[in-house]
Amino acid sequence: MRKLGLIAGGGSLPVELAAHCEAAGRAFAVMRLRGFAEPTLSRHAGIEVGIGEFGKVFKALRAEGCEVVCFAGNVNRPDFSKLLPDARGVKVLPSLIVAARKGDDALLRRVLDEFEKEGFEIEGAHEVMGEMTLPRGRLGKHTPKPEQMADIDKALHVAREIGRLDVGQGAVVCDGLVLAVEAQEGTDAMLRRVEQLPGAIRGSAERPKGVLAKAPKPIQETKVDLPTIGVATLQRAARAGLAGVVGETGRLLVVDREAVIACADDLGLFVLGVDPQGRP
């Protein structure tokens, strides 16, 4: 296998990818994005790099012998006026600013273009790990009740529609009422908002109801920005009184699958995979 350059943002996904490569015997190096990457990643070969330091990261990837790169983890949209790009970054910056005005997906695509120009192939996190995406059907022992199917259907529809509009990837629906949609704040923050809503319109720990749906935007680059869930997502969903989580088969990353299954089983939540663009 060709050596992998892991461009690591925040969260547990880059950590899991590094552990997977280590266990599988795949050579890799980690380019840790300053201010985002987990400190534990510093034990692996690689460097710390700032957003905008394109020349530095290209030089480091070549020095490590990496031919393939994988972007993983959370990265907030930067304040371009405060970036400190290197010489190569200065050349790229104007086109990044133009792309950012068209949306996050256009910005990501522009970044990927620059890496591909340098001869690096892009590999998605789901391709690195193989069995990382949501399978069809239930994940864990809990199954949605018949009365929850209408909420599942509507939440998926809303998630897909806001994706079509390049707004976000997630939506929460309870008893047919849209409680929240995800924009720039991310899933965890959206679920925290749901926690603060009146108890009369959402579920509770004693009587969970409602569903979180996540779906990729039709225009997005799925190699670097698939929707993701993990243990923290399920814990937040439970605190918000939800009954479960639904996503599209092969198009939702499940970080630490065994831990997610155990957490869902323990919390009594269903996790359901449906065919892309299909009904449950």
Image (cartoon, rainbow, N blue to C red):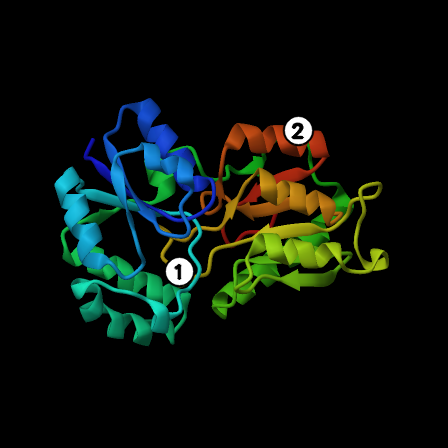
> Which residue is labeled 2 in the image?
141
Residue 91 image point, x, y percent: 18, 70
Query: From what the image shows, is residue 161 above or below residue 235?
Result: below
Would you name the residue on which mark 1 appears?
220
Q: In this view of the protein, which residue sits in the foreground, 144 or 265?
A: 265
Residue 113 appears left or right of 147: left
* Circle 2 SS class: loop
In this view of the protein, which residue sits in the foreground, 43 or 201? 43
Q: Nearer the viewer, residue 77 or 169?
A: 77
Q: Is residue 63 left or right of residue 162?
A: left
Q: Position of residue 276 (x, y in %)?
A: 49, 50
Q: Quadrant of residue 24?
A: top left
Labels 1 and 2: the sequence-earlier one: 2
Q: At 66% from the left edge and 46% from the top edge, which residue is drawn?
A: 236
State the residue at coordinates (59%, 42%). 232
Residue 245 position, x and y percent, is 63, 45
